[in-house]
Every structure is written in structure tokens, then in C-alpha cells.
Image (cartoon, rainbow, N blue to C red):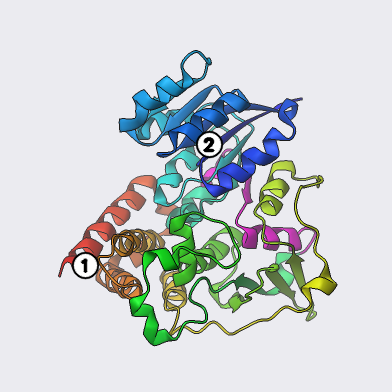
Amino acid sequence: MTRRISIFGATGSIGQSTIDLIARDPDAYETVALTGGRNIAQLASDAIKLGAQIAVTADENRLAELRDALAGTGVEAAAGRQALIEAASRPADWVMSAIVGAAGLEPGLRALQTGATLALANKESLVCAGPLIMRTAQAHGTHILPVDSEHSAVFQALIGEDLATVERIVITASGGAFRDWPIEDLAKATPAQAATHPNWDMGQRITIDSASMFNKALELIETKEYFGVSADKIETVVHPESMIHALVGFNDGALMAHVGAPDMRHAIGFALHYPHRKSLPVERLDLVKLGQMTFRDPCETRWPALRLAREVMEAGGLMGAVFNAAKERALDAFIAEQITFPRMAGVVEEVLSDLSTYESHNPAEITLDKVAEADHLARVRADEIMAQ
């Protein structure tokens, strides 16, 4: 039987890797929806190739361009936020959630409400609204499969294990573009320099987040929300080779690690075929050629985002939504060369302090409206701080 699939964020690196896997076995899938941003040519080309029912661009100003690109193909064209939500509401068996940022939250929720399995690459969904996401999946009897390489690794290491026996979860980090820079030089770093990753091929925003470790900070919070473990059991280690994606430590002293080449098709393929394993077109490691793997302690002076993530996990409530929104606005300002690279963490810390009242929200009462309110106020406050 064919499986109905949708890909949200189809033109990004995760979306393109997902399409690569699906296109290798097209008879196994029926594509419902593809969504993207400004890369209309890529979105249209993929929608035609996969025979999608609908292609949606988030940019309402690009609708005419998308319609022209799809003319005569039978693929419906749509644009804007409501079109994204409508596409996410279409019945599907498996949905890839790879829209970057808080914008991916509501489409993911809608997909869960249809009963679809959600392959979650949008870490912000769990950071901003973890209790809501997990509660929605449970209410509709569906599954969330992690697609971040780290969380997929933890998920795989825990198969057949009792979570009560877990002593620690170790999330690895490459260290990004500036892991070897003198700390005093970071204030001179440019967006172009920050957007060059030593190991992974990713988009601009996530690559800069890797350099600042905000990406890893989000992943620490995501680990707590998805696996339901306490913050004191979650660790980070800098692993420059990016071959070990995560490790799980058990009460007998054993560590189970997921090891593989830095290729997101590992995690995507696992989620796509779960609960089965199927052959994937990824590099097979030559351990002798690799030679050695190294590990470093993550310096929180260099990467204060890690300390802020721990504060957010301890605070709880809607502080994850505040944290992410402030981070997104600070990142916007750095890309626009309005603030320095280190200033991003300073802006986020000030917003967290100013909006600490959002700590008190009961997880069971977190709603989409409350998340949206916290997100909005955090963005406004971040902009005010940066304007001073």
C-alpha cells in the first residue's frame, strides 16, 4: 500500500533530503502537500516530480509565480499562513515537519490532529509548546518521531530499554564555525563566517545557531520535553568530528551511542521507515580511516546559550517560547549586521529576565494562544532592547 505523505519545509535541507529518499521509491508514496518559502522554482519542480496535490509558499507575494510554475500540471498552488494550515489539515499518514522556527508549530499540531505520524525536525515546536505537542499526540493516538540527528540517536538507543534505568543523556555538538576562535575575536565575526559549518550542510539560520550553540540549547530543551527526563540528566559534549550523534548512559554504567556519518538521511530514513530499518544511501564509516574521535568540555563563556537553556528548563512554563522568540529576533538582527555575534546571547538573557512571569504557567494549561502571546511579547521586548 502507498503511504500518503506531506513535507512542510520542503525546500530546506531537511526537506530536500526527505524528497531524495522518497524519490528513490516513488511508487511507495502518494504526496499530499509540499510547502516552502521563497524558492519557488525548487518547490514547483519537486511538487511536479512527486505529483503533489498542493504546493504552498509561505510568501503570499509569490503566489502568482508559483501558479505560473505549476500551470497545466494539475498541482494546486496556494500561499500564506492559512494555506499552510489548510495543507496541514489534509489527511496524510506521515508528515515531515521541517519549517524553521516557531512558524512550524501550528502546522505540526494540525497534522497531529488529523492522526498523522509527525516526523519532527522543527525543534522549536517542543521548545515552545512541548506539553501541548505531546498532549495532542496522545489525544489523537498518533506518534511523534524525532528527526534531529541527536534525538533520533537517543530514540534508537532507548528502543527496548526502561527509561527508569537511564542515568544520563549526552547530546553532542560540533562546536560550529567558531569553536577554535579566540573568544575575544567573536565580536568581529560576520554572518557569512558564522554561516559556514565545518561538518554539516544546512541553511543559514541553523548554521549560525550552530556557531552560537543556540541550536544545541534548543536541543537540550527538546530532549527534556520529548523524553520526559529531568534537566540534570541531560549533558552536552563538543565532538568536532560529528560522528557520534548522542549517547545514553544507563544505571549499570554502560553508554550506548549512535555512530554514523553526518548525513541527515540517517534520521529521516529511520523516521520514514519506522519501525523497520531499510537500506539508506549514506556513507558507511571506515573506522580505521577515521582514526580517532575527540571530545571537549563545552565552555559556557564561549557559548552562554547552553547556560540559558538550563535556566529555561529549570523555569518551565512558557519560558521556552520566550527563549526561542528572543533568539529568533536576535538572530535576525545579527544577520542584518545590527548587533554583534556575542550580543545575541545578551539580548536573549535580558528578555528572559524581563518576562520571567511566564515561568508560572501550568504545563497542563499551555495552549496555542498562550504560546503565541509569549512569543509576541518576547519579540517585542527583544526589539526594544536592541533599539536602546
Secondary-structure class at tag 2:
helix
The image position of residue 210, as x and y in percent, is 49, 67
Q: Which amino acid, by three-letter code, is at mark 2? A: Ala
Q: In the drawing, does residue 273 fall left or right of residue 369?
A: right
Span highlighted in magenta in the image: 135-161
Quadrant (top left, top right, bottom left, bottom right) of the C terminus = bottom left
**Number of other residues with Cα within 10 Å of mark 2, as a class: few under 14, some 14 to 19, many 20 or more:** many
Evaluate whether residue 85 shows in this view: no
Secondary-structure class at tag 1:
helix
User: Is 33 in front, or is 366?
Assistant: 33
Q: In the drawing, does residue 56 fall left or right of residue 286?
A: left
**Number of other residues with Cα within 10 Å of mark 1, as a class: few under 14, some 14 to 19, many 20 or more:** some
- The residue indicated by pointer 2 is 111
At x 47% / y 50%, what residue is drawn?
Answer: 132
At x 34% / y 77%, what residue is drawn?
Answer: 188
- The residue indicated by pointer 1 is 386
Q: Which amino acid, by three-letter code, is at mark 1? A: Met
Query: In the picture shown, does residue 136 fall above or below 348?
Result: above
User: Is 85 in front, or is 180?
Assistant: 180
Q: In the drawing, does residue 324 fall left or right of residue 225?
A: left
Residue 121 bears which disc, if any?
Answer: none
At x 45% / y 23%, what residue is drawn?
Answer: 69
The image position of residue 144, as x and y in percent, is 61, 47
Q: CA distance from mark 2 to mark 1?
A: 36 Å
Query: In the picture shown, does residue 172 fall above or below 294?
Result: above
